[in-house]
Image (spheres, rainbow, N blue to C red):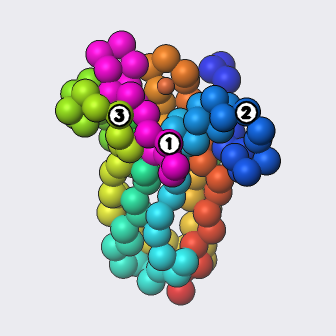
Amino acid sequence: MPKINKYVDIDTIERETKKDLIDRHSPFIHCEEKAQNGEMFQVTVKMGNEYSHPDDFDHYIASISLFNAETLLAKTEFVPGTLGNEKSHAEVTFNIRAKGKKLNLVAHGYCTKHGIWESTAKTVLVS
Ligand SMILES: [Fe+2]
């Protein structure tokens, strides 16, 4: 099994290079706090918050996946050059149908050089 790196609040990290490494590889989930049962719901996942990631041929963000707890909801793949071969924030907006009482959203980002990185979980109430 590959190692899964989990997001750590970079305010708790001292070394600048480690803050950069963690932040640029971490997926951040952006969505509303509540969803309507059975209705479409937008979830944006953006890689990095304060630091951007390379988009080189041998080092780029290759995919972003979105889970509801253990269930994969959606996944997108990128190729090198999607972001013009410039340091940037890979980003995708998924449109999912909200079901049940709540969503426990977790995102994974995959870097071709630094592996899989997991976001903090985000709970969305469904009513
Ligand atoms: Fe990387």
Element marked by disc 1: loop
The answer to whether mark 3 is within 8 Å of ligand 1 is no
Q: Is residue 39 above or below residue 88?
A: below
Question: In the rendering, at what x and y percent does residue 98 appear?
Answer: 45, 71
Question: In the rendering, at what x and y percent does residue 48 appear?
Answer: 49, 45
Q: Which mark is residue 98?
A: none
Q: Pointer 3: what residue?
A: 87
**Residue 1 falls left or right of residue 92:** right
Q: Amino acid at mark 2?
A: Arg
Q: Earlier in the sequence, mark 2 or mark 1?
A: 2
Q: Pointer 2: what residue?
A: 15
Q: Is residue 108 above or below residue 36?
A: above
Element marked by disc 2: loop
For the magenta stretch, what is the residue range? 47-61
Q: Pointer 1: what residue?
A: 51
How dense is the environment of label 2, judged by Cα within 10 Å: few (below 14), some, or many (20 and up)? Answer: few
Question: Looking at the image, which is closer to me, 119 or 50?
Answer: 50
Q: Earlier in the sequence, mark 2 or mark 3?
A: 2
Question: In the rendering, at what x and y percent does residue 56 appear?
Answer: 32, 20
The reply to whether residue 61 is in sight is yes
Quadrant where the image shows the N terminus: top right
